[in-house]
Amino acid sequence: MTFSLPFPLSTLTPLWLRAEGWDRFPGLVHGFSGRVPKNAAEFSQAQGGDLTVCTVKQVHGDEIIMVNQHCKAWEKRPEADGMITAEAGLLLGIASAECVPVLMVAPQQGIVAALHAGWRGTLKGISARAIEMFTAAGNIDPTSLWVALGPAIGGCCYEVGIEIGESLVQRWHPSSLTAWRPHGEKGLLDLREINLAQCEQAGVPRERMQLVGPCTFCDSSRFASYRREGPSASRQLSMIGWQTEPSEPR
Ligand SMILES: [Zn+2]
């Protein structure tokens, strides 16, 4: 499996999880990292070889921006929680420490997206919005998309207020019984399950979606957790892009 990251990202952590089966897409580069220092995950750009890593200033919204080579000239990172691109040579990078990193790919059309889906962005429908953008950008049917949800706090550990859990369930109707469970005066929320439900309703077949990695709160030796570590928490870095221009159709 070829996976080469621009230096110095390649030195941040030895742990990079990949979506099962995505190595069959020629030229695709992707991975979900283990814990990396906060400042290493929130850089502006990193250049290495023919790859430029682009990140945005994440604000827990549902804004997704179309990224092209101009990201190399950004003086300041735009505020957004998702990026989508059809250009090779760019790696879209998302930092997270509890929220769900979402990677999407339409291999035949050569379009990828990376999202940061916390509960606020999930409630607003950031995953569904990304799927609509694939349709708009490449006339891509949602049934041809592949989706991977990376390491995030799980339904085992993510305690939130009743009003948050209920608003998400009422909006996105997850079929999984473990997506939301009342627990004392609060409840336990599985944000990845809510995003799966959201993608499924937007037309992506369940068998094209997968969860990658464990609950970040449970596995705190390998993964950063905002709830454990507070604002100075380390981060996970999740990335996706195309290594080179394809010489023939993918
Ligand atoms: Zn857990």
Image (tube, grey):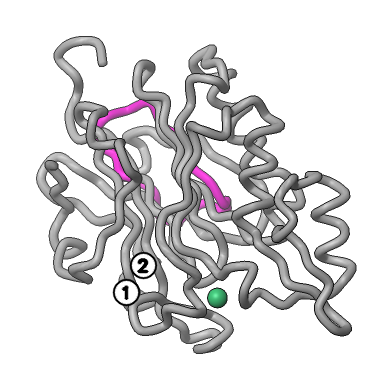
Residue 175: x %, y % from top left: 74, 45
Query: As rendered, which of 40 and 1 lies closer to the eye?
Result: 1
Q: Which residue is mark 1?
A: 36
In-image side of 9 versus 32 (left or right): left
Q: Where residue 140 appears, x then y in whole percent? A: 52, 16
Identity of the residue drawn at 32% across and 74% down: 36
Type of amino acid under label 2: Ala
Q: Picture coordinates of residue 249 (x, y %)?
A: 24, 10
Give the quarter of the image for residue 34: bottom left
Determine whether 72 is above or below 226 in the image. Answer: above
- The majority secondary structure of the magenta stretch comes to loop
Q: Quadrant of the C terminus?
A: top left
Q: Nearer the viewer, residue 163 or 55?
A: 163
Which residues fall within the magenta stretch? 72-91
Which quarter shows the N terminus?
A: top left
Above or below, 214 against 21 in this view is: below
| Rendered residue at 32%/28% (across/down) | 87
Q: Is residue 87 magenta?
A: yes
On the rendering, which quadrant does ligand 1 occupy?
Answer: bottom right
Residue type, mark 1 in image = Val
From the viewer's side, name the closer residue of 153 and 51.
153
Question: Circle 1 sits in a helix, a strand or a loop, which is it?
Answer: loop
The quadrant where residue 13 appears: bottom left
Could you say which disc has been placed on residue 41 in the image?
Answer: 2
Looking at the image, is 42 positioned above or below residue 88? below
Of the pair 67 and 4, the residue shown nearer to us:
4
Does the magenta-highlighted stretch encompass residue 89? yes
Callouts 2 and 1 close, C-beta under 8 Å = yes
